[in-house]
């Protein structure tokens, strides 16, 4: 996706710019990875002072992973924060929602991260929690090699942008889950059809057979259905005795 440079200038209203950004993000409708990449590219083009952007994505109760970035450096620094268990993006996700750093090497809040990030040339950061209702989706992390790169305008624009980004990301996740559910139902229906035709079973009996094998082998029912659809046979548990 090509992202238009939407950097704010005095002649353009923030609302107009955000509307354009929202339309750009909707182009990736239903594709989580595409939406994540679109967010990072659009953030650098929109938020004053931003040179790089990465997204830290929540994958567990306290686990975060880098999922999209405009380059190698933000991806490495996002991963570094998770390994060290400290850094502005983690604080944005779990505590403060917005974290601004004007001179990273001089900041004492995250000494180990600040030392390593400063050695890589990063001086300023601006991190926003991606948040919808009760869900914490992650953080959008903006980087700059200049001291004091982000001002109040950057923070205001970034906060509005992060709101649009979170909504777009939540929508993409929802559609992806719906597609996965539909695909699972299609596979199960196909597998039931095979059993019904081959063994003259009713739909209920065919589903019961799939469920029984799923329970016996401690595997998801959709995995059993996929194997049956691909091989034409129900999977058989290996005999490990003897």
Image (tube, grey):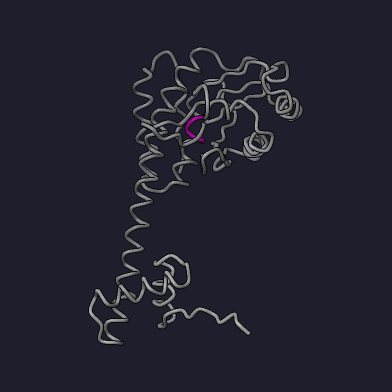
Q: Main secondary structure of the magenta part?
A: helix
Q: Quadrant of residue 124?
A: top right
For image coordinates 39% across by 76% down, the residue present is 229
Q: Position of residue 71 (x, y in %)?
A: 62, 39
- In percent of width and height, residue 202 lies at 23, 79
Nearer-the-camera pick, 76 or 181: 181
Specify the segment rendered in magenta: 40-44
Horizontal placement of 154 versus 173: left or right? right
Q: Is residue 102 left or right of residue 27?
A: right
Q: Is residue 191 left or right of residue 155?
A: left
Vertical relation: 147 (above or below) 64:
above
- In percent of the image, x 57 and y 17: which residue is there? 150
Q: For residue 182, which quarter of the picture?
A: bottom left
State the residue at coordinates (44%, 81%).
Answer: 231
Question: What x and y, as percent, mark residue 196?
Answer: 27, 82
> Looking at the image, which is closer to me, 216 or 174?
216
Q: Nearer the viewer, residue 51 or 133?
A: 133
Quadrant of the image containing the C terminus: bottom right
Q: From this viewpoint, which residue is outermost toward the front?
A: 242
**Eyeballing the image, is 105 above or below 167?**
above
Q: Position of residue 11 (x, y in %)?
A: 39, 14
Magenta residue check for 205? no
């Amino acid at each position: 996706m090509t992202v238009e440079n939407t950097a704010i200038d005095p002649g353009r209203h923030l609302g107009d710019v955000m509307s354009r950004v929202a339309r750009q993000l909707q182009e990736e409708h239903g594709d989580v990875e595409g939406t994540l990449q679109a967010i990072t590219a659009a953030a650098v083009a929109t938020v004053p002072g931003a040179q790089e952007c990465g997204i830290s994505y929540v994958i567990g109760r306290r686990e975060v992973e880098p999922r999209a970035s405009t380059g190698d450096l933000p991806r490495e620094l996002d991963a570094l924060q998770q390994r060290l268990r400290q850094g502005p993006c983690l604080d944005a996700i779990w505590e403060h929602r917005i974290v601004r750093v004007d001179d990273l090497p001089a900041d004492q809040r995250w000494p180990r991260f600040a030392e390593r990030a400063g050695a890589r040339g990063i001086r300023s950061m601006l991190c926003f929690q991606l948040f919808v209702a009760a869900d914490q989706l992650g953080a959008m992390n903006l980087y700059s090699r200049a001291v004091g790169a982000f001002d109040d305008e950057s923070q205001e624009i970034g906060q509005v942008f992060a709101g649009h980004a979170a909504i777009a990301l939540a929508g993409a996740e929802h559609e992806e889950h719906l597609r996965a559910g539909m695909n699972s139902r299609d596979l199960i229906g196909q597998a039931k059809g095979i059993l019904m035709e081959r063994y003259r079973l009713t739909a209920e009996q065919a589903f019961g057979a799939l469920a029984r094998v799923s329970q016996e082998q401690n595997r998801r029912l959709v995995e059993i259905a996929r194997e049956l659809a691909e091989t034409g046979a129900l999977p058989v548990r290996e005999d490990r005795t003897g």
